[in-house]
Image (tube, grey):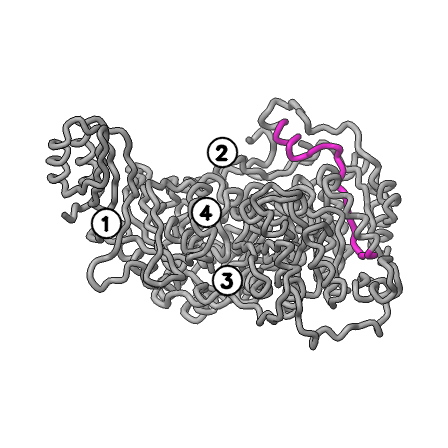
């Protein structure tokens, strides 16, 4: 974010007795909140957030949450007012992914809370640390179908790690602290505290303590040494080992341990989609991403390995394809902090429950000799050349999306952060961006929520360092789902670059219709799309458009150079499909390189 | 469609011989065997707070675990409640049930009870009272207590194993059953053994006896 127009915090605005968020920031207006004792539930809520070190919160105002907002107004926490609660949840989620600590979002009761649900479900599927605070009608009205009443804890129960209905002004601060701690302890996930208005308005002088998980909440850090030893022997004897690196490696800050281990023992590395960035894709041992749209070589390696060391992965169906044919000859060593993930989908011969960094260090300590896998590594390299991800880009044809992804990758630093919506553009970003650093890939993996990209870029921007570029690859369909958040990016002058890979289709659906529905493009063909460059200008952002290869380099340069939000409407080849592809439930080793191989 | 990738086609690639079954376990494809479901009792110690029952029942419904009965009640510690859950699942499923339950924050500990655990169910059976002496005789046979009588109805209370209650219901059937209410079993481990061991111990226990078949024993 640029120095000259950081988001204006509410305590600054308060002094000018104005709600004009463009008011000049005045460092003198800093309030000393530390010493002020709390007097209400809402003050206790905000104090708990401050105790947890929360710097940013994303949300939308509304009746039942007003008492909390009133206190936030005087707090040091910077609140970013989003256009829609879904945007608030996605922004908080992305903030959590990049920062490694829970992102916080707020919404009022009823529609505010239900609008958060998509973002909460996304965080739940991807194990992203996030805290949602929702207003609720006063306790005495709960159950009466009051105005804007929804059973928020009921609605969000299946998509949260834990949620709480607060009943007591004395306890509400600790409820919030506990939810914050739970969100990032063990396997991360979203938590929610529902805050009835009488509780937040209620009197209390109870200072919330430091955020802590309940005493009964246990997390196993180190794996059973006996199984570690057995797994180490297995690795030493492996002829065809593969490491499968998942998002848990990034969340568990185990990137270094995993890289060292793989490199030391020369084990080829495959990543899942959330695992992108955990291992440098420009390294010889990297086989890149496996699964439905993974590389051919990653899928060959995983199909033919005899020892699969899965770290921080939940063996999702988009990764495994059909269970029957997934790594069918591999003994599986599975490292995960969540015991319930072990043998949930794929049976693990060596179940290693614990923190990824700790357990990989345990393994590193135990493994005495590297596997004898020279032949296997040569085979892996052969597959890399057999199934290379090369594509043609004839100059007289429409621009290839792959070319745009690579051009932006080249024009940005290694630490640039990529967010995406969901669909073809997301897969091209996975396939053609070379990820080398953890916490630089921010996407909706498990839930597959279109519209994730732009609000995620906003959240990621606030968590990123100033020298990290934030790029959002979006599709025309995804972008239209949350485009209103552009107003937020402009208002807060956030330096983000959106590249809309525009094919005027819900492209992934169109691709499936061509492959599996005889080319009947039911509800996938727009036929007309707004001009995103002009729309961007109307929002106050900078708009660009690319139609030809000649425009690509200089347009990207101009968009990146603009210190604020910019949108590049890239008119790509509308017929381009995403390959390789393993059809749903298919055999990874039988991935199709073209539609007629499906 | 355009810009097609190159490389050996699927049929030109080597394929491994191994296979997994639908539970993700490597199997010999010649003699593929899936594990059969079995019925077992899982005991969970939980925080005695609102919402915990819906946490647990919601978990069972969204993960499609096959649940037969669930009972819940307070314990010696007023902040804790005990749930006794009868499930019918193949082995990997039972392990998943335990692990997923343990993940719920208000759940303190979970354990699959050994087959010799004490299990009791209570049933209230209301029958037509046209032949009261015979009702009393059948009740005696099953150690049932008469709890209500009206000119037209007699209600008995019976506790015991599921089989005993099933048998009793069949016997009372001759009088014409008007209504039945059953609790589903509640259970405790025998002797000094803790019914809900700590998470760690339970993990080890389940690892050492994953395939033990559970037979319902009548303790009477």
Check disc 3: other Cα within 10 Å, few if <14, some if 14-19, many if 20+.
some
Along the line of sight, which residue is nearer the eye, B17 or A126?
A126
- The residue located at (53%, 42%) in the rendering is A318
Pointer 4 chain: B
Pointer 2 chain: B
Instruction: Please state which of the two labelled residues, at mark 1 or mark 2, is closer to the viewer.
Output: 1
Instruction: Please state which of the two labelled residues, at mark 2 or mark 4, is closer to the viewer.
Output: 4
In this view, A193 is above or below A38: above
Residue A186: image tag: 3
Q: CA distance from mark 1 to mark 2?
A: 57 Å
Numbered range of the magenta stretch: A492-513
Q: Which residue, as the protein is rendered here, is positioned at the far front?
A: B151
Q: Going by the image, does B85 lie left or right of A287?
A: left
Determine contact: label 4, label 3, CB under 8 Å.
Answer: no
Residue picked out by circle 1:
B119
Residue picked out by circle 2:
B11
Q: CA distance from mark 4 to mark 1?
A: 24 Å
Q: For numbered disc 2, what is the local secondary structure? A: helix
Pointer 3 chain: A
Instruction: Please state which of the two labelled residues, at mark 4 or mark 3, is closer to the viewer.
Output: 4
Along the line of sight, which residue is nearer the eye, B10 or A47?
A47
- The residue located at (38%, 43%) in the rendering is B23
Sequence order check, earlier mark of 4 and 1: 4
Q: Is residue A547 visible?
A: yes
Residue picked out by circle 4:
B54
- The residue located at (79%, 66%) in the rendering is A11
Q: For numbered disc 3, what is the local secondary structure? A: loop
Q: Percent position (x, y) of residue A3?
A: 84, 66
Q: CA distance from mark 2 to mark 3?
A: 44 Å
The mark tally for this picture is: 4
Determine contact: label 1, label 3, CB under 8 Å.
Answer: no
Q: Is residue A262 magenta?
A: no
């Amino acid at each position: 974010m640029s120095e000259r127009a950081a988001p204006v915090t509410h305590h600054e605005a308060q002094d000018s007795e104005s709600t004009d968020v463009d008011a000049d920031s005045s460092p003198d207006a800093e309030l000393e909140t530390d010493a002020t004792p709390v007097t209400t539930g809402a003050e206790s809520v905000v104090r708990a957030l401050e105790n947890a070190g929360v710097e940013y919160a994303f949300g939308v105002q509304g009746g039942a949450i007003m008492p909390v907002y009133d206190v936030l107004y005087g707090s040091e926490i910077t609140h970013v007012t989003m256009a829609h609660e879904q945007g608030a949840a996605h922004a908080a989620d992305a903030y959590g992914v990049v920062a490694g600590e829970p992102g916080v979002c707020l919404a009022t009761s009823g529609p505010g809370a239900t609008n958060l649900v998509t973002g909460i479900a996304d965080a739940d599927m991807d194990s992203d640390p996030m805290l949602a605070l929702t207003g609720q009608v006063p306790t005495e009205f709960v159950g009466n179908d009051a105005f804007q009443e929804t059973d928020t804890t009921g609605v969000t129960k299946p998509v949260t790690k834990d949620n709480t209905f607060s009943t007591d002004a004395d306890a509400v601060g600790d409820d919030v602290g506990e939810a914050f701690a739970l969100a990032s302890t063990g396997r991360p996930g979203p938590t929610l505290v529902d805050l009835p208005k009488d509780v937040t308005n209620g009197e209390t002088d109870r200072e919330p303590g430091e955020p802590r998980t309940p005493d009964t909440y246990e997390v196993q850090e180190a794996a059973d040494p006996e199984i570690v030893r057995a797994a180490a022997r297995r690795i030493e004897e492996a002829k065809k080992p593969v490491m499968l690196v998942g998002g848990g490696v990034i969340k568990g800050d185990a990137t270094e341990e995993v890289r060292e281990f793989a490199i030391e023992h020369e084990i080829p590395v495959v990543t899942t989609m959330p695992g992108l960035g955990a291992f440098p894709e420009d390294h010889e041992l990297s086989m890149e991403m496996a699964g439905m749209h993974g590389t051919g070589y990653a899928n060959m390696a995983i199909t033919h390995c005899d020892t699969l060391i899965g770290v921080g992965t939940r063996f999702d169906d988009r990764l495994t394809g059909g269970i029957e044919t997934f790594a069918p000859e591999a003994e599986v060593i599975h490292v995960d902090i969540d015991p319930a993930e072990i043998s949930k989908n794929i049976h693990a011969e060596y179940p290693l429950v614990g923190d990824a960094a700790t357990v990989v260090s345990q393994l590193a300590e135990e493994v005495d000799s590297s596997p004898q896998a020279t032949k296997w590594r040569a085979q892996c390299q052969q597959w890399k050349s057999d199934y290379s991800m090369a594509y043609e880009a004839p100059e007289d044809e429409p621009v290839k999306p792959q070319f745009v992804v690579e051009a932006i990758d080249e024009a940005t630093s290694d630490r640039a952060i990529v967010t995406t919506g969901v669909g073809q553009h997301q897969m091209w970003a996975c396939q053609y961006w070379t990820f080398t650093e953890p916490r630089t890939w921010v996407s909706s993996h498990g839930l597959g929520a279109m519209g994730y990209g732009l609000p995620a870029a906003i959240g990621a921007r606030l968590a990123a360092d100033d020298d990290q570029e934030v790029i959002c690859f979006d599709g025309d369909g995804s972008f239209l789902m949350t485009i209103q958040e552009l107003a937020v990016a402009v208002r807060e002058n956030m330096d983000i670059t959106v590249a809309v890979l525009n094919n005027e289709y819900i492209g992934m659906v169109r691709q499936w219709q061509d492959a599996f529905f005889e080319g009947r493009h039911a509800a996938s063909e727009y036929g007309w799309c707004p001009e995103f460059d002009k729309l961007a200008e109307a929002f106050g952002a900078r708009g660009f458009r690319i139609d030809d290869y000649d425009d690509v380099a200089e347009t990207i340069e101009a968009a990146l150079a603009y210190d604020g939000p910019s949108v590049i409407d890239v008119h790509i080849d509308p017929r381009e499909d995403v390959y390789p592809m393993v059809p749903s439930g298919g055999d990874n080793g039988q991935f199709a390189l073209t539609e007629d191989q499906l | 469609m355009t810009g097609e990738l190159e490389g050996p086609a699927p049929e030109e690639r080597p394929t491994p011989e191994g296979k997994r079954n639908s539970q993700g376990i490597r199997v010999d494809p010649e003699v593929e065997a899936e594990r059969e479901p079995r019925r077992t009792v899982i005991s969970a110690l939980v925080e005695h707070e609102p919402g915990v029952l819906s946490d647990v029942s919601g978990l069972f419904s969204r993960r499609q675990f096959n649940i037969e009965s669930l009972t819940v009640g307070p314990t010696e510690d007023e902040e804790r409640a005990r749930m006794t859950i009868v499930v019918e699942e193949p082995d990997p499923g039972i392990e998943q049930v335990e692990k997923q339950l343990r993940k719920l924050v208000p759940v303190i500990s979970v354990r699959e009870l050994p087959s010799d655990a004490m299990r009791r169910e209570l049933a209230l059976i209301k029958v037509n009272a046209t032949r009261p002496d015979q009702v009393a005789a059948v009740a005696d046979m099953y150690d049932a207590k008469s709890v209500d009588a009206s000119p037209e109805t007699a209600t008995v209370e019976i506790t015991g194993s599921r089989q005993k209650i099933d048998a009793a219901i069949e016997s009372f059937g001759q009088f014409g059953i008007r209504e039945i209410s059953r609790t589903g079993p509640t259970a405790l481990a025998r002797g000094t053994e803790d019914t809900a061991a700590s998470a760690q111990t339970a993990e080890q226990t389940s690892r050492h006896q994953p395939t033990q078949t559970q037979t319902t024993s009548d303790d009477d």
